[in-house]
Image (cartoon, rainbow, N blue to C red):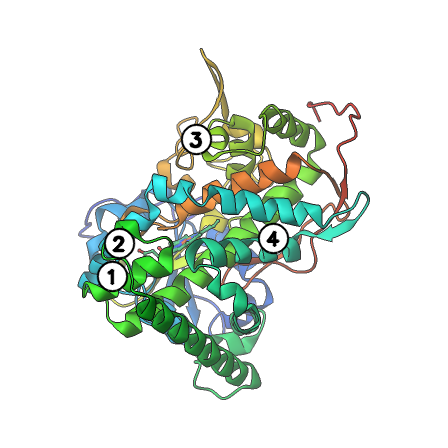
Amino acid sequence: MSDSAGRHDGDGESEDAVRPPEPDGLPVLGNVHSLTADALDFYERRADERGGVARYDVLGTESYLLTDPHAIRRVLVEDHANYVKGEMPREQLGSLLGDGLFLAEAETWREQRTAMRSAFFRERVDAYGDVMVGHARTLAADWDDGDVVDLDEAATQYAFSVLAEGLLGDDVERERETVRAAAKSITERFDMRRLTSFLPEWVPTPTNRRYRRRLDALRDTLRELVAERRQAGPPTDPGSADDLLGTLVVAAELGAIDDEELLDNAVTFLFAGHETSALGLTYTLHALATRPGFQERVRREVTAFDDDPTPAQVRDSPALTAAVDEALRLYPPVHSFFREPTEPVTLGGYRLPAGVVVTLSPWVVHRDGRWWEDPETYRPERWLRTSPSGEVSVGDDTPGPAVGGRPEYAYFPFGGGPRHCIGMRFARLELRLATATLLRRVRLDPVDEGLTLRASANTRPAGPVRVRVHEPDGRTVSVDD
Ligand code: HEM
């Protein structure tokens, strides 16, 4: 992929900066047809054709796909104060996530993030380790030698159970069906293959109506759970809450958030946290099934533990860590996210007006041949380095940034800057503990070699992701596939 306009990386203001070339596409509708046909392919082609700042329009909204890692860093880190999440995500997700952490802006966001930080400190996240391992054990116990398993379904069930128990307590298990129904409606509502996903929520399509009904039911359920917690007498300090709902109830008692924000955040965590992690696990396991040699290498690493893995052990497991980090590169669960400049900005040598949509796409950048050799191939080895003390992964605790002189933002599956994913540590631990626990028990063979993905709110598989599970039978598998 090249910057076809030949412009520089775009740090700093530029007097003679010009507007990027006008989009193609139809009047009014803009590029919406190409986006609904295949958004991932559209973004990739747009980046190839137009370079580092590629204009496209969606139903009259002026949008710019930003693919240069330095410019991305500028938006997320250095100049983050000049950007908001903006209208577009709010129009799409506002009814779901309200004023929760994901959409909140400015001071409201800062207060919420501060109130919730402690729930994601390493010790607190490590305390969920047993839950993460326990549900993986339960999953494997359901599998018999030779079974064909749909990883998407299995991982969704797994990640949902972990989040339910780890963050919202056992209570959510009781309401599993309400939550599942809401989750299904949300996936449907944000399926970018449907033209209706670009329509505002108030347009009374059957999908929108079902979505509204199920979301209302979910909020009623959460309201009841919060009331029960309050009656039981919440802890007084956020650091001592057992789970995330507890942290939220304490934050409300201390006045950091109001009752509606409490509910918005409970929904935010449930949905920001479970589908993304499920997709990360699906893609890691499927990719390992297609690389039997590397799968064996991970298995040897994790069967060296006396028992099921602990958080400290998986952090110290380079091949396992590389397997996960590489899956999040090739198949980032969040294919793109958005910002809106609050004043005119210069990016990639171009002048963008305030109020436009700036699209940041891990999908496109993670597959850019300028930063990644053989970008479309799953190659976990690219994350491994040999050090005097043996093999290490470049990203033992946080996902590995620059390897081989690559810019930091050539890899950003969890976003970046002050608004990076608050659940990153939780998700990376969960993905490694689940993969390790499962690979101690089963060998995975691919049923479908290829993976067809489509853009919904997240990067979803187009169909089932099937693998065959076997008991590891002592068969010799070469680690050099
Ligand atoms: C593999 C799993 C995950 C991926 C790939 C992922 C990805 C992301 C990305 C890219 C963002 C930044 C969005 C933006 O800047 O607009 C984000 C934000 C966020 N994520 Fe995650 N996430 C994952 C797991 C989780 C989990 C497990 C939780 C909660 C337990 C969570 C909660 C959130 C929240 C609340 C935000 C908004 C943070 C803020 O704006 O301050 N995520 N995530």
Query: Disc 1 designates what residue?
Result: 251
Q: Earlier in the sequence, mark 4 or mark 1?
A: 4
Residue shown at 26% from the left, 54% from the top? 238
The outermost residue toward the top is 388
Mark 4: which secondary structure?
helix
Q: Nearer the viewer, residue 200 or 217?
A: 217
Q: Could you tell me the amino acid type at mark 4?
A: Ala
Q: Residue lying farthest bottom?
A: 204
- Residue found 45% across the figure and 62% down from its top: 270
Q: Earlier in the sequence, mark 1 or mark 2?
A: 2
Q: Nearer the viewer, mark 4 or mark 1?
A: 1
Q: CA distance from mark 1 to mark 2?
A: 7 Å
Query: What residue does disc 3 label?
Result: 396
Q: Is residue 105 left or right of residue 326?
A: left
Report helix, strand or loop for mark 2: helix
Q: Residue at x 46, y 35 (%)?
A: 311
Q: Which mark is residue 238?
A: 2
Badges 1 and 2: C-beta atoms under 8 Å apart?
Answer: yes
> Which circle marks residue 346 in the picture?
none
**Alpha carbons under labels 4 and 3: distance apart:** 23 Å
Query: Based on the displayed image, in which of its 4 quarters is residue 246 positioned?
Result: bottom left
The kind of residue on which mark 3 rests is: Asp
Residue at the location (56% across, 35% down)? 323
Position in image of residue 20 (x %, y %): 34, 58
Q: Earlier in the sequence, mark 3 or mark 2?
A: 2
* Lower sequence index among marks 4 and 3: 4
Q: Which residue is mark 4?
A: 155
- Asked whether residue 46 appears in the rendered view, the answer is no
Between residue 308 and residue 182, name the one nearer to us: 308
